Amino acid sequence: DAGITQSPRHKVTETGTPVTLRCHQTENHRYMYWYRQDPGHGLRLIHYSYGVKDTDKGEVSDGYSVSRSKTEDFLLTLESATSSQTSVYFCAISEGSGELFFGEGSRLTVL
Amino acid sequence: KQEVTQIPAALSVPEGENLVLNCSFTDSAIYNLQWFRQDPGKGLTSLLLIQSSQREQTSGRLNASLDKSSGRSTLYIAASQPGDSATYLCAGLYTGGFKTIFGAGTRLFVKA
């Protein structure tokens, strides 16, 4: 299995609070991604990174920001969480072939 | 618009049956096609990756094919087992960016 660790795995928070999810990889892959998975919408890309300090928006980036200060870490921040951001968040990594490897997911509930 | 479609949404088969899961995509400018397995509450596990220059890939009881001209990929599972019960997703990575489009998945149930 690809060495991808997401933390926290479960989090319950209140509307308006900031939340940061962390993705850590030990594969030294260049590309890292944050997806969210929701019933009826499938997997949707939030943000991705193609190198240290190089990030770009995906299709559902509003309300989210990311940072990548080291190859191995990719952080997803919800500046002010809303109930619509209740979801399961997945981190993924890839290299030249484009083959994606996923973490185990972080389940976020915003009350 | 690039879309990936999987039909059927759910499938129930008896143990031992050979089965085919279907995936169709709308744009032939596909860089690769990847099949995943997802168990409830878990992440996605990569099963097979087919590059655009390839026609098929095999791993154990699994065989995936890719036909860019018809916009179709199939995942063949031989001699299905109850442990194969899961949701299977296909995803197409398109050239020109980092855009991977996922299908909604086929939920497979193999009855013992």
Image (cartoon, helix red, strand yellow):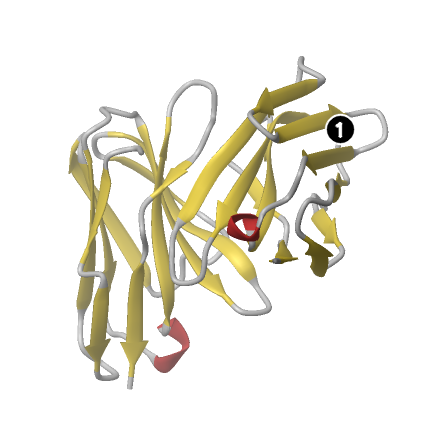
> Which residue carries the number 1 mark?
B28
Residue B10's place in the image compared with A3, above or below, is: below
Q: Kindly indicate the quadrant of the structure image that contains residue B91.
A: top right
Of B79 and A17, the residue lying toward us = B79
Q: Kindly indicate the quadrant of the structure image that contains residue A19.
A: bottom left
Left or right relative to A69: residue B103: right
- Residue most extreme to the left: A70
**Residue shown at the point (25%, 83%) measured from the top left:** A15
Residue B89, how many percent across, how many down?
59, 47
Residue B27, how many percent across, how many down?
75, 35
- Check disc 1 and report its element: helix, strand or loop: loop
Left or right relative to B85: residue A105: left
**Residue shown at the point (29%, 80%) measured from the top left:** A110
Q: Is residue B51 visible?
A: no
Residue A106, how many percent across, how many down?
28, 60
Residue A60's place in the image compared with A108, above or below, is: above
Of A29 and A81, the residue lying toward us = A29
Hey, what amino acid is under mark 1?
Ser
Residue B107's place in the image compared with B88, above or below, is: below
Q: Residues within 10 Å of mark 1 (few under 14, many from 20)?
A: some
- Residue most extreme to the top: B53
Chain of the residue under label 1? B
**Residue shown at the point (77%, 25%) measured from the top left:** B68
Of A21 and A55, the residue lying toward us = A21
Residue B60, how many percent across, how many down?
55, 26
**Residue shown at the point (61%, 58%) measured from the top left:** B112
